Amino acid sequence: MHEIVVLSGKGGTGKTSLVGALAALGENQVLCDADVDAADLHLLLSPHLKARHDFYAGRQACIRREQCVKCGECLDWCRFGAISDDFVVNPILCEGCGVCQALCPVSAVDFPENLCGEWFISETRFGPLVHARLGIAQENSGKLVTLVRREARQLAEANGLEWILTDGPPGIGCPVISSLGGASAVLIITEPTVSGRYDLERVASLADHFRMPSFVLVNKADLHWPMAKSIRKFCDVKGYLFMGYLPFTTTFTQAQVEGKTVVEIDADLLKSQLTKLAVKLRTAVRRLDPEG
Amino acid sequence: MIISVASGKGGTGKTTIATNLAVALGEPVTLLDCDVEEPNAHLFLKPTLYRRMDFFVEVPEIDLAKCAFCGKCQEICQFNAIGILPDTALTFPELCHSCGGCFLICPEGAVLSSQRLMGRVEIGARGPVHFVHGRLRVGEAMAPPLIRRVRQEETRDGLTIIDAPPGTSCPVVTALYGSDLVIMVTEPTPFGLNDLELAVGAGRALNLPMGLVINRCDMGDRRVHEFAARENLPILLEIPFDKNVAENYAWGKLLVEALPEWRGMMQSLFARIQQEFFAGGLGRNLETAG
């Protein structure tokens, strides 16, 4: 089994549109949306929901008003400023560390598990999809990423499917780190801008840090060819496999509006470019990781 | 006064609005780049950075000579950052949230204060714009402590503009908490709308006033406009797609300098914000601060 995780560092470079296109061009696969706090892949795949599960992670303090003697100790202990002067815990600020609960002299603090979101298994026209929705302003996105990836892997194993295609989150922090472990390769999609390049360098060095091979694709390349070419040069120097360029085109937006992947509405140049890319990608991954 | 710039979806133009608005004002303002995972504002603002500080958080280290291996620290730690074995103790600093519970609970005084490097804070200026950003160390998972550190640089009396990270989870909440206004920069596409709905949900949970900037307003569909009307979110500015903008952005140019109409556009955005949210009061605050 091979898992390709699509990352970008910078947001808005085309991760989800690319994953949609690769999904449409692939088979024998499980799809996984690991951008759990702003998941969009379902908007292209119109999933048919098969199963829904609650996601519990971490805990949150809650002071029982009738038992609290207002001694003020917890206000001194809480390093997150989450307890108000009238002894109410602010759920937005509570880190779930449990210090107030463990040390309260009159045991007036409850510490229930947190419902942080939900996750789903769905069927799509390109294969099963594992996706999730983090609750509003919730924490533990890294744990939810780990969970959806584990479920995707189990689904692939149970059904003897060779590929997992994972739509990753932007950035380089906790959910991105959670999307890397055990993957076969990272496909980074960037854009020819100073910020696209800067963010590419950071996310690629994160992949290096975890000894994960990086492949790089420049989207919207014709917005700025000199920058696009300098990114290619950077990849050659760093040893990241360069996957090619995609053009700036409103077809991606049009596909989104129609709720389809770009290769379903464009039968011409873009589709042939993406088809070549899909073949190149799968060949490279198989060569790197023959056993899967 | 704190104005944050957020979006939900990445790549909609947060940094473009935050940097160009800060420069167009032409008066003292603090710009904080709180997207510490991928800070980009400095690439466009090009400030002179005059101060750099490593940023550490407090983590435990166990003094094995004093440790009685009672396991109380392991028990209080919700983040599995301490492991007590029969005759040794392990700490996992990368999992530690620096809550201080282990220091408080240890009966032997065996938990010592140690440090973990989270990243770097850099302070600079460009003309009247005072600039601060954080760069999370590559490989570090936790952004919120560094975001909180960057936010300590807010100005009390004047105007602070915060460039927030994408998404809707803890880094965004940490960046937006307590803002006087959030400018949600979005685009009229299904992805833009879906992520905007989530971000507005987070804004409502934090009880924050919000307004929209619709970027590339002539691409996609009208559903973001319908959402804005339904949710009573004022549309503060609409910016059509322009290849010139994209090219100047690609080079790292500030649009208020490259394209003359942008200065006026940003100034009218600010005027609209004052009129819509602060009834003219923000300008007076700025004058007294200056």
Image: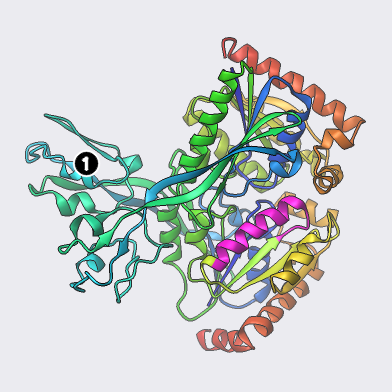
Instruction: Give the answer, above or below, for where A252 lies relative to B55.
Output: above
Residue B192 location, x and y as percent?
72, 54
Instruction: Give the answer, above or below, for where A127 lies relative to B159.
Output: above
- Looking at the rendered structure, the secondary structure element under dot 1 is helix
Q: Nearer the viewer, residue B242 or A101?
A: A101
Residue B168 location, x and y as percent?
56, 55
Q: Answer left or right for A178 relative to A3.
A: left
Q: Answer left or right for B243 relative to A126.
A: right
Q: Residues within 10 Å of mark 1 (few under 14, many from 20)?
A: many
Q: Answer left or right for B91 relative to A21.
A: left
Image quadrant where residue B153 sits: bottom left
Stretch in magenta = B186-204
Q: Is residue A218 visible?
A: no
Question: What amino acid is at disc 1?
Answer: Gln
Residue B235 location, x and y as percent?
74, 72
At x 56%, y 41%, the residue is A119
Give the farthest residue toward the front: A50
Let me know if residue B201 is in the magenta part. Answer: yes
At x 28%, y 54%, the residue is A98
Give the farthest residue toward the top: A291
Let me know if residue B66 is in the magenta part. Answer: no
Residue A211 location, x and y as percent?
49, 25
Disc 1: which residue: B74
Query: Main SS type for the magenta part?
Result: helix
Image quadrant where residue A22 sits: top right
- Residue under mark 1: which chain is it in? B
Q: Is residue B56 visible?
A: yes
At x 28%, y 62%, the residue is A78
Image quadrant where residue B282 sits: bottom right
Picture quarter with the N terminus of chain A: top right
Give the farthest residue toward the right: A268
